[in-house]
Amino acid sequence: MSKICQITGKTSMIGNNVSHSKRRTKRSFDINLFTKKFYLEEEKRWIVLRVSAAGMRVINKNGLKAALDSAVEKGIILSY
C-alpha cells in the first residue's frame, strides 16, 4: 500500500540529507501513518483506515462521517 493518509491526502516528501560539510544526498520524509479501526455509527459497522496523526485530529474535530464525506468530495478516497 502507498504511504498516503486516507483523510487528509498527505504523502511523503522528498528532501535532502545535509552533512556537516554541506554535502547533499536525497532522502524521503515519511508521514506519521497508523492503521486504525473506526466505528461508523450511521452504518453500524467498523471501517479500517490508514490515517496520519493529523487525520486523526480532523476526525476528532469534525466527526468520522464529515471527515469521510470531505475525503470523498476531494477525491482522496472513492467510497467508504
Image (spheres, grey):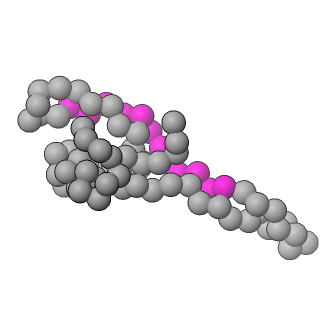
Residue 43, position in %: x, y? 11, 31
Q: Which residues are magenta?
A: 28-39
Evaluate whether residue 24 shows in this view: yes
Which residue in the rendered view is the most extreme toward the bottom?
22
Which residue is at 16% across, 45% downward?
Answer: 65
User: What residue is shown at x 42% (from left), y 34% (from top)?
Assistant: 35
Q: Quadrant of residue 45?
A: top left
Percent x, y of residue 80: 24, 38
Work out whether residue 15 or residue 20 is closer to the camera in this orientation and state it.
15
Seen from this angle, which residue lies furthest right? Answer: 21
- How many numbered discs sit on the rendered protein? 0
Residue toward you, 18 or 27: 27
Residue at image coords 32%, 46%:
77
From the viewer's perspective, tell me whether residue 50 is left or right of residue 61. Answer: right
Could you tell whether 47 is left or right of 31 in the image?
A: left
**Most common secondary structure along the magenta stretch:** strand
Q: Is residue 61 above or below residue 48?
A: below
Is residue 47 found left or right of 22 in the rendered image? left
In the displayed structure, would residue 11 be above or below residue 35? Answer: below
One can see residue 57 in this view: no
What x and y, as percent, mark residue 16?
A: 74, 65
In terms of image quadrants, where is residue 28?
bottom right
Q: Seen from this angle, which residue lies furthest top?
A: 45
* Coordinates of residue 41 in the picture (x, y in percent): 11, 34
Residue 21 is covered by the magenta coloring: no
